[in-house]
Amino acid sequence: METQERDKILLESGTNEIEVMKFTVQGEFYGINVAKVQEIIMSSKVKPMPHAHPSVEGIFKPRDTLITVINLSHYLSGEMAEKTPRDLFIITNFNRMTVAFRVQSIEGISRISWKAIQKPDKTLANGVESITTGIAQCEDQLVSILDFEKIVAEISPETTIQVSEVESLGVRPINNSPIMVVEDSVLLRRMIDDSLERAGFTQISNFNSGQEAWNYLRSISEDPALYQKVNLIITDIEMPEMDGHRLTKLVKEHPNLKKLPVVIFSSLIDEQMRKKGEELGADEQLAKPEIGKLITILDDLLDRFKRQTANY
């Protein structure tokens, strides 16, 4: 993918659209957010690592950088598909990590609205949270957009949110400021809630998508007691129906809501995404899984918000 084209995609602001790169594993179509893709390369020899997760093939070293290779076929089905010279590595970058995923082919890129992406029903995942962010209709194909963040968290739990970061902050006072957490991943939402509760925050409301959060915010936007119901919003970026960038844009353009601090907490935060968030008016942005830093930021933003709204 040309750098100029990727930058153009990333710098477009608040359109509620996603660029999905389609690929195949064992003949099935899957997708990944283009913003997570660093490059696509031909597969190469991988050095196995002892005691690694069964879905981890091992490591390889392109251009003097050690990269872990995850076999998506094994992760998705429990079976290691036959490797061929035509296999590809999707080199990803998110959560400040670089990871390669083995796939069979790349089938192109589709630009679609988050509104066109539906969260799969729990019955499709035997009652547990799905490993897909959503199901998208891309041209004539149904594509499962995989939750790569969840995949890596399951394979390597130490790479995700760590409660120990909160405990290292020491004893903290109770904070009754109402906070909205907008996150579609049940796993990550649970981790965020647990961390905030351990940090002393007592009023946390959860929302599964930007659309759900926006519906609530609009319903209370004319309420004189608005600031008794919400003081701050923490939002992910990748979510079905409405993404976090679109939510941020709508909040910051609304005359009654624009004073609310918005923190974008996402695995996608890099230099280009930070520019996009700044354009949209986000008060702070940080990459998962920096939960300790998030709590420090919340303290500062909530103090500032209370001073600014003291007379309301």
Image (cartoon, rainbow, N blue to C red):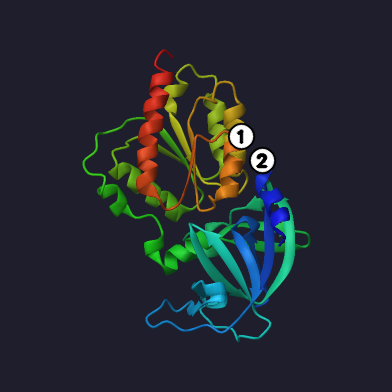
Percent x, y of residue 99: 52, 68
Q: Is residue 124 left or right of residue 192?
A: right
Instruction: Identify the residue at image location x=44%, y=32%.
Output: 232
Report the number of discs.
2
- Residue type pointed to by label 1: Lys
Q: Residues within 10 Å of mark 1 (few under 14, many from 20)?
A: many
Percent x, y of residue 216: 53, 32
Residue that numbered label 1 is attached to: 249
Q: Nearer the viewer, mark 1 or mark 2?
A: 2
Q: Quadrant location of residue 300?
A: top left
Gap between marks 1 and 2 measured at Cα: 8 Å
Instruction: Identify the residue at image location x=45%, y=19%.
Output: 225
- Spot the residue most to the right: 140
Vertical position of residue 73 compared to residue 222: above or below: below
Vertical position of residue 81 compared to residue 22: above or below: below
| Labelled pair 1, 2 in contact (Cβ < 8 Å) | yes
Using the image as rendered, state which of residue 284 and residue 312 is in the foreground. 284
Residue that numbered label 2 is attached to: 13
Label 1 secondary element: helix
Percent x, y of residue 8: 71, 49
Q: Quadrant location of residue 244?
A: top right
Q: Earlier in the sequence, mark 1 or mark 2?
A: 2
Q: Residues within 10 Å of mark 2 (few under 14, many from 20)?
A: some
